[in-house]
Amino acid sequence: PGGGNPGGGDPGGNPGGGDPGDGGNNPGGGGTPAPTNAVGAVSTGAGNIITAVGGTLSGVGAQLPATTILGGTSGLTDSLGNAVEGLGGAVTTLGNGVKDGLGQTGNIADPLGTTTDSLGNVVTQVGGAVNDLGGGVATVGAGTPIMPITAGLGGVVSTTGDLVEGIGGKLGDALNSSGANSLTKALDDVVTPLAGALGDSGSPITSGNLVAAAGNAAGGLVGGGSTAVAGL
């Protein structure tokens, strides 16, 4: 608790008015809510693991340009480093999507949709990584008889990366469409009540609640599924 300075006061006069203090420690800010059920907790844990793997890959990629491989071809080491960093970024994006979506089951309206919405970016980042790798392959053997071969191979790899990036963009558009959103919402109406019935790690499953939740979820799936199909 914050303590104000005691006021001095005049001798024989008015007592000093001390500062009121700062009221103690400020409460913490908003942040991401903690998982409220087992599904959210497991998904958050999985997302954290995936994110950690992505961070590790990105760290390795950042170090690769300082490594001499294949005769000191700096173009290859730089491109390989960028590719691994890009792949790490894709994995991190996936982990965050799992944490922020399924990890928040019971806290947000569309946890499944939040996770699937990240998939387009994941694929796009993978495509970018492949594209980076192609640029490096094309530099191998520069000034030697094998250069036409490596240049052609690098071009093929880069073209593949472009195609994957394009697929990622289209996938992102499809997953953000009204039809896809209706479908994920219908599935959310099944997953969320079931997750709530399962309880958290400190509460056992209540079979009566689970049966009731399953019945209600099935009804919601039929209605929501019909709406989703019509939207497609």
Image (cartoon, grey):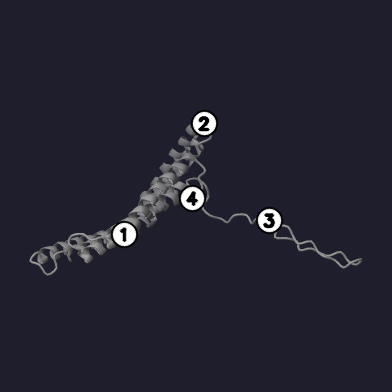
Local crowd at mark 2 within 10 Å, few (<14), some, or many (≥20)?
few
How far is the residue under mark 1 from the one under mark 3? 45 Å
What's the residue type where badge 1 is placed?
Gln
Q: Secondary structure at mark 4?
A: loop
Q: Would you name the residue on which mark 1 appears?
A: 63
| Residue 52, x across and y down, in percent | 39, 50
All told, the count of numbered labels is 4
Who's the residue at 42% across and 46% down the image? 186
Mark positioned earlier in the residue sequence (1 or 2): 1
Who's the residue at 50% across and 41% down the image? 37
Q: Would you name the residue on which mark 4 appears?
A: 109
Determine whether 217 is above or below 156 in the image. Answer: above
The single residue placed furthest to the top in the displayed view is 207
How far is the residue under mark 3 from the one under mark 4? 35 Å
Q: Nearer the viewer, mark 1 or mark 2?
A: 1
What's the residue type where badge 2 is placed?
Thr
Residue 122 seen in the current view: no
The single residue placed furthest to the left in the displayed view is 145
Mark 3 in CB contact with mark 4 (< 8 angstroms): no
Q: Secondary structure at mark 1?
A: helix
